[in-house]
Amino acid sequence: MSSSTAQLLRGLTGLTQRLPVQRAQIHSKPPREELGTMDAAVRLTSCFLCFLLPSDWVLSHLESYKKWE
């Protein structure tokens, strides 16, 4: 590594140490009403249908994707 590259890297790392880091001010309140069992079941089922079902379909048809037609 040349000396100019080393100086450039040293300068960049020194610059990042001096930059201020912004912190998010996140404040949360407790929920207004409790989630029921049915609410949790509906949300879990919708997550399953939206994310896991399409990926399962693709993985089950992977052999047909590999074939040239």
Image: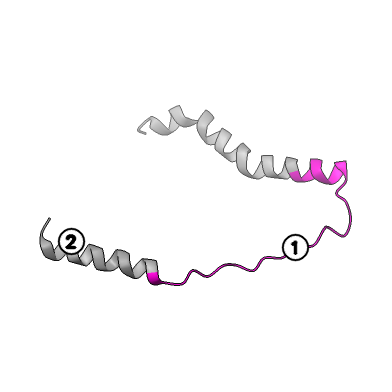
Judging depth in this view, the residue of 23 and 47 nearest the camera is 23
Q: Secondary structure at mark 1?
A: loop
Judging depth in this view, the residue of 18 and 62 nearest the camera is 18
Judging depth in this view, the residue of 63 and 36 nearest the camera is 36
For label 1, count other residues whose C-alpha is less than 10 Å away and answer few (under 14), some (14-19) or many (20+). few
In this view, 37 is above or below 61: below
Residue located beneath label 1 in the image: 28
Residue plotted at (28% across, 67% down): 12
Residue plotted at (49% across, 68% down): 21
Image quarter hosting the C terminus: top left
Horizontal relation, residue 4 to residue 55: left or right:
left
Residue 45 picture location, percent across and down: 74, 40
Residue located beneath label 2 in the image: 6
Residue 64 picture location, percent across and down: 45, 30
Horizontal relation, residue 32 to residue 57: left or right:
right
Determine which of the numbered discs, if any, sits on residue 63 in the image. Answer: none
Inspect the image, locate mark 1, and give the three-letter code of the amino acid beneath it.
Ser
**Residue 28 belongs to magenta span:** yes
Residue plotted at (51% across, 32% down): 59
- Tell me which segment is drawn in magenta: 18-43
Residue 6 picture location, percent across and down: 17, 61
Image quarter hosting the N terminus: bottom left
In this view, 26 is above or below 52: below
Horizontal relation, residue 53 to residue 46: left or right:
left
Which SS does the magenta portion mostly show?
loop
